[in-house]
Image (cartoon, grey):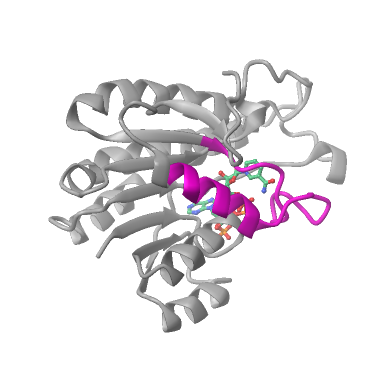
Amino acid sequence: MSHVLITGANRGLGLEFARQYGQDNWSVIAVCRTNQENEELKALADEYDITIEVVDLGDFNAIDQLAAKYRNQPIDILINNAAVFGPKAKADGDLRQNFGTMDYDLWSDLLRVNMMAPFKLIEAFIDNIATSDEKKIAAVSATPGSITETDPGLNAYRTTKAGLNMAMATLATELKPQGISIAIFCPGWVKTRMGTDAAPLTSDVSINGMRTLISELDIESTGQFRRFNGETIPW
Ligand SMILES: NC(=O)c1ccc[n+]([C@@H]2O[C@H](COP(=O)([O-])OP(=O)(O)OC[C@H]3O[C@@H](n4cnc5c(N)ncnc54)[C@H](OP(=O)(O)O)[C@@H]3O)[C@@H](O)[C@H]2O)c1
Protein backbone atom coordinates (compact mmCIF):
# COMPACT_ATOMS: atom_id res chain seq x y z
CA MET A 1 0.00 0.00 0.00
CA SER A 2 1.22 3.53 -0.79
CA HIS A 3 1.31 6.27 1.85
CA VAL A 4 0.83 10.01 1.50
CA LEU A 5 1.07 12.77 4.11
CA ILE A 6 -0.97 15.91 3.38
CA THR A 7 -0.93 19.15 5.39
CA GLY A 8 -3.93 21.47 5.60
CA ALA A 9 -6.15 18.46 4.95
CA ASN A 10 -9.34 19.68 6.65
CA ARG A 11 -10.49 22.03 3.89
CA GLY A 12 -9.89 23.33 0.39
CA LEU A 13 -7.18 21.77 -1.70
CA GLY A 14 -5.80 19.62 1.12
CA LEU A 15 -9.21 18.04 1.71
CA GLU A 16 -9.53 17.25 -2.00
CA PHE A 17 -6.03 15.71 -2.05
CA ALA A 18 -7.15 13.51 0.89
CA ARG A 19 -10.40 12.57 -0.86
CA GLN A 20 -8.75 11.61 -4.15
CA TYR A 21 -5.85 9.65 -2.64
CA GLY A 22 -8.30 7.96 -0.22
CA GLN A 23 -10.59 6.99 -3.12
CA ASP A 24 -7.58 5.48 -4.89
CA ASN A 25 -6.89 3.29 -1.85
CA TRP A 26 -3.85 5.16 -0.59
CA SER A 27 -3.16 5.28 3.12
CA VAL A 28 -3.45 8.98 4.01
CA ILE A 29 -1.97 10.86 6.97
CA ALA A 30 -4.13 14.00 7.03
CA VAL A 31 -2.60 16.82 9.07
CA CYS A 32 -4.88 19.56 10.45
CA ARG A 33 -4.10 22.64 12.54
CA THR A 34 -6.86 21.93 15.07
CA ASN A 35 -9.58 19.42 15.75
CA GLN A 36 -12.16 22.06 14.85
CA GLU A 37 -13.77 22.50 11.44
CA ASN A 38 -12.67 19.12 10.13
CA GLU A 39 -16.06 17.38 9.90
CA GLU A 40 -15.73 16.73 6.15
CA LEU A 41 -12.34 15.12 6.71
CA LYS A 42 -13.72 13.02 9.57
CA ALA A 43 -16.48 11.80 7.25
CA LEU A 44 -13.85 10.84 4.65
CA ALA A 45 -11.86 9.05 7.36
CA ASP A 46 -14.92 6.87 8.05
CA GLU A 47 -14.92 5.83 4.40
CA TYR A 48 -11.23 5.56 3.48
CA ASP A 49 -7.84 4.74 5.06
CA ILE A 50 -7.28 8.24 6.43
CA THR A 51 -5.62 8.98 9.78
CA ILE A 52 -6.18 12.49 11.10
CA GLU A 53 -3.29 14.14 12.96
CA VAL A 54 -3.60 17.51 14.70
CA VAL A 55 -0.48 19.66 14.44
CA ASP A 56 -0.12 23.42 14.27
CA LEU A 57 2.65 23.74 11.70
CA GLY A 58 4.02 26.80 13.45
CA ASP A 59 5.02 24.47 16.30
CA PHE A 60 8.17 22.69 15.12
CA ASN A 61 8.40 20.54 18.27
CA ALA A 62 4.97 19.20 17.40
CA ILE A 63 6.23 18.35 13.89
CA ASP A 64 9.12 16.40 15.45
CA GLN A 65 6.67 14.57 17.72
CA LEU A 66 4.54 13.62 14.72
CA ALA A 67 7.61 12.33 12.87
CA ALA A 68 8.62 10.28 15.94
CA LYS A 69 5.18 8.66 15.93
CA TYR A 70 5.66 7.55 12.30
CA ARG A 71 9.33 6.46 12.61
CA ASN A 72 10.05 3.51 10.26
CA GLN A 73 6.82 4.14 8.31
CA PRO A 74 7.67 4.82 4.64
CA ILE A 75 5.90 7.86 3.18
CA ASP A 76 5.77 7.79 -0.61
CA ILE A 77 4.58 11.37 -1.07
CA LEU A 78 4.80 14.30 1.33
CA ILE A 79 2.47 17.10 0.24
CA ASN A 80 3.21 20.48 1.80
CA ASN A 81 -0.12 22.13 1.07
CA ALA A 82 -1.09 24.19 4.14
CA ALA A 83 -0.58 27.95 4.06
CA VAL A 84 -1.97 31.24 5.26
CA PHE A 85 -2.83 34.05 2.85
CA GLY A 86 -2.82 36.88 5.35
CA PRO A 87 -4.97 40.02 5.34
CA LYS A 88 -6.77 40.86 2.12
CA ALA A 89 -6.46 44.56 1.35
CA LYS A 90 -8.77 44.48 -1.66
CA ALA A 91 -11.57 42.45 -0.06
CA ASP A 92 -11.41 43.65 3.53
CA GLY A 93 -9.47 46.91 3.42
CA ASP A 94 -6.95 45.28 5.78
CA LEU A 95 -3.57 46.79 4.88
CA ARG A 96 -1.31 44.82 7.23
CA GLN A 97 0.73 43.29 4.42
CA ASN A 98 1.00 46.49 2.41
CA PHE A 99 3.97 48.85 2.19
CA GLY A 100 3.62 51.64 4.76
CA THR A 101 1.33 49.65 7.06
CA MET A 102 3.17 46.32 7.33
CA ASP A 103 2.56 44.19 10.42
CA TYR A 104 5.95 42.55 10.91
CA ASP A 105 4.75 39.99 13.48
CA LEU A 106 2.17 38.84 10.98
CA TRP A 107 4.81 38.63 8.22
CA SER A 108 6.97 36.56 10.53
CA ASP A 109 4.07 34.18 11.27
CA LEU A 110 3.38 33.73 7.55
CA LEU A 111 7.04 33.01 6.82
CA ARG A 112 7.05 30.37 9.56
CA VAL A 113 3.96 28.52 8.35
CA ASN A 114 4.27 28.96 4.57
CA MET A 115 8.03 28.76 4.05
CA MET A 116 9.83 27.28 7.08
CA ALA A 117 7.29 24.62 8.07
CA PRO A 118 7.43 22.83 4.68
CA PHE A 119 11.23 22.71 5.00
CA LYS A 120 10.92 21.50 8.61
CA LEU A 121 8.45 18.77 7.59
CA ILE A 122 10.89 17.49 4.97
CA GLU A 123 13.71 17.47 7.53
CA ALA A 124 11.52 15.63 10.04
CA PHE A 125 10.21 13.03 7.56
CA ILE A 126 13.25 12.61 5.31
CA ASP A 127 13.92 9.01 6.40
CA ASN A 128 10.26 8.11 5.82
CA ILE A 129 10.46 9.52 2.29
CA ALA A 130 13.90 8.06 1.50
CA THR A 131 12.80 4.53 2.46
CA SER A 132 9.57 4.66 0.41
CA ASP A 133 9.01 3.37 -3.13
CA GLU A 134 8.06 6.72 -4.70
CA LYS A 135 10.34 9.14 -2.80
CA LYS A 136 8.35 12.25 -3.79
CA ILE A 137 7.63 15.66 -2.29
CA ALA A 138 5.11 18.20 -3.56
CA ALA A 139 5.01 21.82 -2.43
CA VAL A 140 1.88 23.85 -3.12
CA SER A 141 3.22 27.30 -3.86
CA ALA A 142 1.52 30.10 -5.83
CA THR A 143 2.12 32.19 -8.93
CA PRO A 144 2.38 35.37 -6.78
CA GLY A 145 5.65 33.84 -5.53
CA SER A 146 7.17 34.25 -9.01
CA ILE A 147 9.66 37.13 -9.21
CA THR A 148 8.01 38.03 -12.54
CA GLU A 149 4.78 38.86 -10.65
CA THR A 150 5.32 42.14 -8.86
CA ASP A 151 1.87 43.70 -8.56
CA PRO A 152 1.95 45.84 -5.39
CA GLY A 153 0.39 44.45 -2.21
CA LEU A 154 0.44 40.94 -0.73
CA ASN A 155 4.07 41.51 0.28
CA ALA A 156 3.97 38.95 3.10
CA TYR A 157 2.24 36.16 1.17
CA ARG A 158 4.32 36.69 -1.99
CA THR A 159 7.63 36.55 -0.17
CA THR A 160 6.68 33.38 1.71
CA LYS A 161 5.96 31.65 -1.58
CA ALA A 162 9.09 33.03 -3.31
CA GLY A 163 11.10 31.78 -0.32
CA LEU A 164 9.32 28.42 -0.45
CA ASN A 165 10.21 28.13 -4.14
CA MET A 166 13.90 28.80 -3.46
CA ALA A 167 13.96 26.39 -0.51
CA MET A 168 12.31 23.62 -2.57
CA ALA A 169 14.46 24.20 -5.67
CA THR A 170 17.59 24.04 -3.52
CA LEU A 171 16.41 20.89 -1.74
CA ALA A 172 15.61 19.32 -5.11
CA THR A 173 19.31 19.59 -5.94
CA GLU A 174 20.40 18.45 -2.49
CA LEU A 175 18.10 15.42 -2.34
CA LYS A 176 18.58 14.27 -5.94
CA PRO A 177 21.45 11.89 -5.07
CA GLN A 178 19.03 10.08 -2.69
CA GLY A 179 16.55 9.62 -5.55
CA ILE A 180 14.04 12.02 -3.96
CA SER A 181 12.17 14.29 -6.38
CA ILE A 182 10.29 17.51 -5.63
CA ALA A 183 7.48 19.21 -7.54
CA ILE A 184 6.59 22.85 -6.91
CA PHE A 185 3.07 23.84 -7.95
CA CYS A 186 0.69 26.69 -8.42
CA PRO A 187 -2.76 25.07 -8.09
CA GLY A 188 -4.44 27.79 -10.18
CA TRP A 189 -7.07 30.13 -8.76
CA VAL A 190 -9.40 27.70 -7.00
CA LYS A 191 -12.70 28.03 -5.10
CA THR A 192 -11.59 27.51 -1.48
CA ARG A 193 -11.64 29.67 1.64
CA MET A 194 -8.42 31.24 0.36
CA GLY A 195 -9.42 31.41 -3.30
CA THR A 196 -13.01 32.56 -2.54
CA ASP A 197 -16.11 31.79 -4.61
CA ALA A 198 -14.91 34.24 -7.27
CA ALA A 199 -12.28 31.71 -8.39
CA PRO A 200 -12.86 30.03 -11.78
CA LEU A 201 -11.56 26.56 -10.85
CA THR A 202 -12.97 23.83 -8.63
CA SER A 203 -10.63 21.91 -6.36
CA ASP A 204 -11.25 18.55 -8.09
CA VAL A 205 -9.87 19.93 -11.39
CA SER A 206 -6.82 21.45 -9.72
CA ILE A 207 -6.07 18.35 -7.62
CA ASN A 208 -6.59 16.01 -10.58
CA GLY A 209 -4.02 18.06 -12.46
CA MET A 210 -1.47 18.13 -9.63
CA ARG A 211 -1.91 14.41 -8.92
CA THR A 212 -1.21 13.63 -12.56
CA LEU A 213 1.95 15.74 -12.40
CA ILE A 214 3.00 14.02 -9.15
CA SER A 215 2.51 10.61 -10.76
CA GLU A 216 4.69 11.71 -13.70
CA LEU A 217 7.33 13.32 -11.47
CA ASP A 218 10.75 11.68 -11.63
CA ILE A 219 14.32 12.54 -10.78
CA GLU A 220 14.82 14.14 -14.22
CA SER A 221 11.94 16.58 -13.70
CA THR A 222 12.69 17.40 -10.06
CA GLY A 223 12.75 21.03 -8.97
CA GLN A 224 10.35 22.51 -11.53
CA PHE A 225 7.73 25.19 -10.81
CA ARG A 226 4.57 24.29 -12.72
CA ARG A 227 0.88 25.12 -12.83
CA PHE A 228 -1.68 22.37 -12.08
CA ASN A 229 -2.17 21.96 -15.85
CA GLY A 230 1.53 21.34 -16.50
CA GLU A 231 2.52 24.82 -17.74
CA THR A 232 5.99 25.90 -16.61
CA ILE A 233 5.90 29.04 -14.44
CA PRO A 234 8.88 31.41 -14.60
CA TRP A 235 10.70 31.73 -11.27
N1 LIG B 1 -7.10 28.62 -3.59
C1 LIG B 1 -6.33 29.26 -4.44
O1 LIG B 1 -6.81 29.93 -5.36
C2 LIG B 1 -4.83 29.17 -4.33
C3 LIG B 1 -4.06 29.82 -5.29
C4 LIG B 1 -2.67 29.71 -5.23
C5 LIG B 1 -2.08 28.96 -4.24
N2 LIG B 1 -2.85 28.34 -3.30
C6 LIG B 1 -2.16 27.54 -2.29
O2 LIG B 1 -2.83 26.30 -2.15
C7 LIG B 1 -2.64 25.79 -0.82
C8 LIG B 1 -3.99 25.40 -0.22
O3 LIG B 1 -4.78 26.57 -0.17
P1 LIG B 1 -6.39 26.53 -0.06
O4 LIG B 1 -6.88 27.35 -1.17
O5 LIG B 1 -6.87 25.16 0.13
O6 LIG B 1 -6.54 27.40 1.28
P2 LIG B 1 -7.52 27.27 2.53
O7 LIG B 1 -8.83 26.80 2.10
O8 LIG B 1 -7.42 28.56 3.27
O9 LIG B 1 -6.82 26.11 3.40
C9 LIG B 1 -5.57 26.34 3.98
C10 LIG B 1 -5.25 25.14 4.87
O10 LIG B 1 -4.00 25.38 5.55
C11 LIG B 1 -4.19 25.11 6.93
N3 LIG B 1 -3.27 25.85 7.79
C12 LIG B 1 -3.09 27.18 7.85
N4 LIG B 1 -2.23 27.49 8.85
C13 LIG B 1 -1.87 26.31 9.43
C14 LIG B 1 -1.05 25.95 10.51
N5 LIG B 1 -0.40 26.88 11.24
N6 LIG B 1 -0.92 24.65 10.83
C15 LIG B 1 -1.57 23.69 10.13
N7 LIG B 1 -2.38 23.96 9.09
C16 LIG B 1 -2.53 25.26 8.74
C17 LIG B 1 -5.63 25.54 7.20
O11 LIG B 1 -6.07 25.06 8.43
P3 LIG B 1 -7.36 25.78 9.18
O12 LIG B 1 -8.57 25.35 8.43
O13 LIG B 1 -7.29 25.22 10.58
O14 LIG B 1 -7.13 27.24 9.14
C18 LIG B 1 -6.31 24.93 5.98
O15 LIG B 1 -6.48 23.55 6.17
C19 LIG B 1 -1.91 26.90 -0.06
O16 LIG B 1 -0.54 26.62 -0.02
C20 LIG B 1 -2.18 28.14 -0.90
O17 LIG B 1 -1.17 29.13 -0.73
C21 LIG B 1 -4.21 28.43 -3.31
Q: Nearer the viewer, residue 108 or 126?
A: 126
Residue at the bottom extreme? 46
Q: Residue at x 39, y 28 (%)?
A: 221
**Residue 120 seen in render:** yes
* Above-or-below relation of 3 to 158: below
Q: Is residue 86 left or right of residue 65?
A: right
Residue 36, percent across and down?
A: 54, 71
Q: Residue at x 23, y 45 (%)?
A: 129
Instruction: Tell me if residue 17 comes above or below residue 104 in the rendering.
Output: below
193 in magenta: yes
Q: Is residue 150 above or below residue 9?
A: above
Q: Residue at x 61, y 35 (%)?
A: 142
Location of the C terminus (image quadrant): top right
For the record, the magenta segment spans 185-214
Left or right for 51, reference 40? left
- Residue at the limit of the structure toward the left, as seen here: 72
- In the shown orientation, is residue 136 left or right of residue 157? left
Q: Nearer the viewer, residue 111 or 222?
A: 222
- Can residue 81 be spotted in the picture? no
**Could you tell me how many numbered marks the image carries?**
0
Q: Where is residue 212 shown, x and y percent of the image? A: 48, 48
Q: Residue at x 48, y 42 (%)?
A: 213
| Residue 204 is one of the magenta-drawn residues | yes
Residue 95: percent from left, percent from top: 80, 34
Does 150 appear above or below 71? Answer: above
Query: Picture coordinates of residue 219 (x, y %)?
Result: 30, 30
Please identify the quadrant where the N terminus is shown: bottom left
